[in-house]
Amino acid sequence: MITTAVFDTKPYDRDSLTRASANTDLDWRFLEFRLTRETAPLARGAPAVCVFVNDQVDRPCLETLAAQGVKLVALRCTGYNNVDLAAAKALNLKVTRVPVYSPYAVAEHAVALLLTLNRKVHRAFNRVREMNFSLHGLVGFDLHGKTAGIVGTGKIGRIVAQILRGFGMRVLAFDPFPTPDWAAQQGVEYVDALTLAGLSDVISLHIPLTPETKHLIRRETIDRMKPGAILINVSRGALIDTTALIEALKSGRLGGVALDVYEEEEGIFFEDLSGQVLQDDELARLLTFPNVLITSHQAFLTHEALSDIARTTMDNITALAAGGPFVDGSVLA
Ligand code: NAD
């Protein structure tokens, strides 16, 4: 029996991991709180921990895990900006992630946000339920014939680009590691970042959060964008400087913003805070704009993605016991 302490467990994690591990010797210790240096002792006796995007896997946390006898930190997500990999290496802790799971889940959510925001479906839904059948203020624009800018043409960005080509949009892309054959096949044009910013009616971010990409969207870069552009971010919150974003929304510089991620989402997203006073003033301000649409990091939430995530996580835990091999592309440390 191999026990894994699963931190920040939500009902859908419990379902997908339990289903995937039926008839195996894997055992899950489901914990509903996040992994931090304070909660790390709760991993005692488990050779593996399973964590998600908002667990704080910093050096002190890893030191405590190692002292408890933990050997593997298995991330059930793609991004790993919340893990101190250098510390993990030094402590001889293996760290794995899920390198690929349904990229369609995330790409389709980005497009869902775009369509909802542009055609004001979120406002129409509330209005009609109040028996307000007025169309006042609900005018959108045709995506057909407009220009989309895709920042990052990895697994997810490429699918978003293809879907938007299907709408009849001109699609521009920027990526320091372009895939020219794919672009030629799909009718996507690679341009430099400034050209993309200046020509795009819709900009969608599909890049990892790194020290280089932190606050990629800030006052200077927003100033380069087409006035009235729509910005979509389903990648990581800190790609955008929230203070600059709020200024651009107040001044009308941006036409609308759809976010599935938020710079300070930790401790807020994934939780039911409906009975509490929201303490984050910038998030509270964002929620007042009619042209801002926010979902709480749910782009990955499809049956297909959850089952892919559970399968890779399970295979890596099994590999720990068997001495390898780990899932291709999943080992970070
Ligand atoms: P990927 O690694 O396949 O692609 C990322 C691409 O970004 C690469 O092609 C890379 O060259 C490019 N890139 C890096 N820095 C860049 C820069 N400064 N400008 C332009 N391009 C740059 O990753 P992916 O699977 O497509 O995922 C993208 C991001 O989506 C992940 O890093 C993760 O943070 C986020 N994500 C979010 C959710 C969610 O539920 N909201 C789910 C999965 C992934």
Image: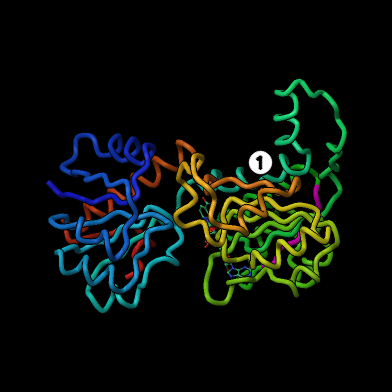
- Taking the image in four quarters, ligand 1 sits in the one at bottom right
Camera-side residue of 325 and 231: 231
Q: Is residue 281 left or right of residue 139?
A: left
Q: Nearer the viewer, residue 42 or 25?
A: 42
The answer to whether 320 is drawn above or below residue 93 in the figure is above
Secondary structure category for the residue under label 1? helix
Mark 1 Cα-neighbour bin, 10 Å: few <14, some 14–19, many ≥20: some
Residue 26 among those drawn in magenta: no
Point 34% across, 45% down: residue: 9
Give the extent of the magenta segment: 169-174
Q: What type of secondary structure mainly makes up the magenta span? A: strand
Report whether 228 appears left or right of 246.
Answer: right
Quadrant, the C terminus: bottom left
* Residue 99 visible in this rendered orientation of the protein: no
Report which residue position mark 1 lands on: 112
Q: Which residue lies furthest to the top in this view?
A: 131
Q: Quadrant of residue 322?
A: bottom left
